Image (spheres, helix red, strand yellow):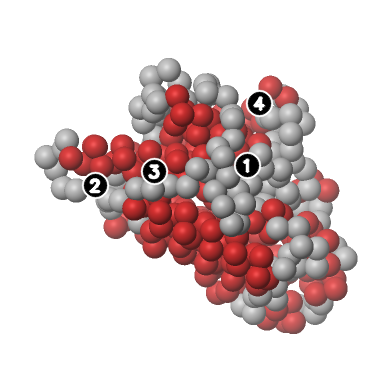
Amino acid sequence: MLSNAHKALRPSASPLAAVVSGQQCQPSFVPSINESASAAQPPLQHRCMGTKSPVQDPGLRAAFGYCIEEVRSCDYENYVWAAQLSKELRPAVFALRAFNVETAQVADQVRSKEPTLLQMRYQWWRDGISNTIKGSPPKHPVLLALRSVMDLQQQSSSSSSTAASPKLRQYHFKRIIDTRENDLLDPQPPLTVEGLEQYAEGTASQLLYLQLASANIQSREADHAASHLGKAVGIATLLKGTKYHGERRRSYLPVELCAKHGVSQEDVYSAQPSDGMCDVVLAVASVAKNHLDEARALAGRIPREAAPLMLMSVGCDSYLRALEACNFDPFHERLQGRGSPLSPLMHVLRVKMHLLRGTY
């Protein structure tokens, strides 16, 4: 989420998408519900893949190129840190984050918003993931890329004399899909903060577990940190999209807190700032900050190679700090830009600083 300055550091299209603040990004590959579509034709080379990438097959490089472009266009804040990863980690992370983008945009792809059609689209992804894990991925670039990641993991595991590497488990993919589907089919606001935490655990935390598994990291402490960081990122993302969702008559501010502070759902929909609204947002942001602090407190206990995979913490921290500077007004104009409240250069520098220090 970057500002208009330093245009070279951001894409020409809006980097804001459903995975960042709820805004729509135009995907270039939307498979048919009833049949597998032909693979899109992204460029065969992408600078984030590099000539020494572990993926050398031209067809697979095209699939990974699609994934990278999808994340760059629709989730630019996370593209920034993912592009800084080692060549061994980048393919898996971009494939996983492209899967996150695709499943986050199902509602945008189904124009009629009919529940049955939404359920069919999500079932397509469930079946696609199941077939991908079985070794027969549909001809969708994201699923082809994920299958390639799984094959590379199997090769690495078979050539290693150490314990078996963790796998990309179907459970985590299914949890993301189920959580997003349930959210679309039940548009009521969460009753409590715990509802927000459950949504964040079902999406952002599951994605982090998959990222760790893709890097062959087995660590209870890393999983614990991922759970906390996912909740922080997920809640901050929902707060970030308050105005966008309100314009579409959706709210993720807990009903219990709104009632306590005298905030109605219409206040949220009409973007009416008030002391009560700021109190509600403060309470929710405090939960996100506590989870972020818990995740960072575990930094010294997780494997060092896990730290780069936690760098979405940079954007989360920047947003929470900016929200505090705006007196917890989610509708403040400073928070409605395309990207991070940080300048593009500062955002990149903070990512690089954490990479050098082995922190997040």
Mark 4 or mark 1: which comes first in sequence? 4
Q: Residue furthest top?
A: 51
Mark 3 is surrounded, within 10 Å at the Cα level, by few (under 14), some (14 to 19) or many (20 or more) other residues, namely many
- Taking the spot 35% from the left edge, 56% from the top edge, the residue there is 169
For this view, does 306 lie left or right of residue 231? left
Residue 110 in which image quadrant: bottom right
Residue 246 in which image quadrant: bottom right
Label ID, residue 9: 4
Mark 1 is surrounded, within 10 Å at the Cα level, by few (under 14), some (14 to 19) or many (20 or more) other residues, namely some
Amino acid type at image mark 1: Phe
Kindly state the secondary structure of the residue where label 1 is placed: loop
Tell me the distance, in whole angstroms, between the alpha carbons under discs 3 and 4. Answer: 30 Å
User: Which tag is nearer the camera, tag 2 or tag 3?
Assistant: 3
User: Which tag is nearer the camera, tag 4 or tag 1?
Assistant: 1
Amino acid type at image mark 4: Leu
Tell me the distance, in whole angstroms, between the alpha carbons under discs 4 and 1. Answer: 25 Å
- Taking the spot 49% from the left edge, 33% from the top edge, the residue there is 64
Label ID, residue 29: 1
Q: Which residue is mark 3?
A: 147
Amino acid type at image mark 3: Arg
Mark 3 or mark 4: which comes first in sequence? 4
Query: Can you say which quadrant of the picture contains the N terminus?
Result: top right
Taking depth in this image into account, of 141 and 184 the one nearest to the observer is 141
Residue 42, visible in the rendered structure:
yes
Mark 3 or mark 1: which comes first in sequence? 1
Label ID, residue 165: 2
User: Which tag is nearer the camera, tag 4 or tag 2?
Assistant: 2
